Amino acid sequence: MAKTKVISLEGAVKTDAGLTYKGVVMEPIVEKCEGCERVAAVEGDNYCPTYAQPERKWAHGVCNFATHVRAEVDKTGKVKVNPLKASKRAARGR
């Protein structure tokens, strides 16, 4: 049985600045957010109740709150090794 949360922005008020919810101005979702389970519709627009500025969440890659996107695995096959740990292992002879 999967957990499903009903996400709502109950008590949100639409103003000129945007949607205000608990004192925070929420911005509408961006195109990359389409398909996410967290999206909530309020007065004809879709908003993310988890993050007020969804565009900023996608600025450096994938949003960590996105339920519709999976992280990609490094295709090079190389494993990152901490240089400090590598030098200690080399000193022990491992």
Image: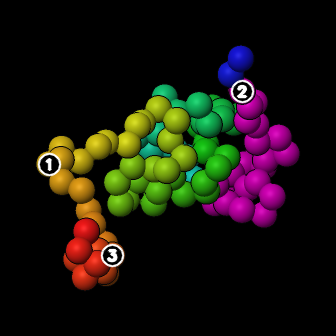
Pinpoint residue 89: horizontal percent, then vertical percent: 29, 74
On whether residue 42 falls in the magenta region, the answer is no
Crowding at dot 3, Cα within 10 Å, few <14 / some 14-19 / many 20+, comes out as: few
Q: Secondary structure at mark 1?
A: loop
Q: Dot 2 corresponds to which residue? A: 3
Q: Secondary structure at mark 2?
A: loop
Q: Earlier in the sequence, mark 2 or mark 3?
A: 2
Crowding at dot 1, Cα within 10 Å, few <14 / some 14-19 / many 20+, comes out as: few
**Among the 4 quarters of the image, the one containing residue 93:** bottom left
Question: Is residue 93 found left or right of 72 in the rendered image?
Answer: left
Question: Is residue 50 found left or right of 81 in the rendered image?
Answer: right
Q: Quadrant of the C terminus?
A: bottom left
Q: Dot 1 corresponds to which residue? A: 76
Pinpoint residue 15: horizontal percent, then vertical percent: 71, 54
Is residue 45 at least partly visible in the picture? no
On whether residue 12 falls in the magenta region, the answer is yes
Q: Quadrant of the N terminus?
A: top right
Q: Nearer the viewer, mark 2 or mark 3?
A: 3
Residues in magenta, as a range: 3-26
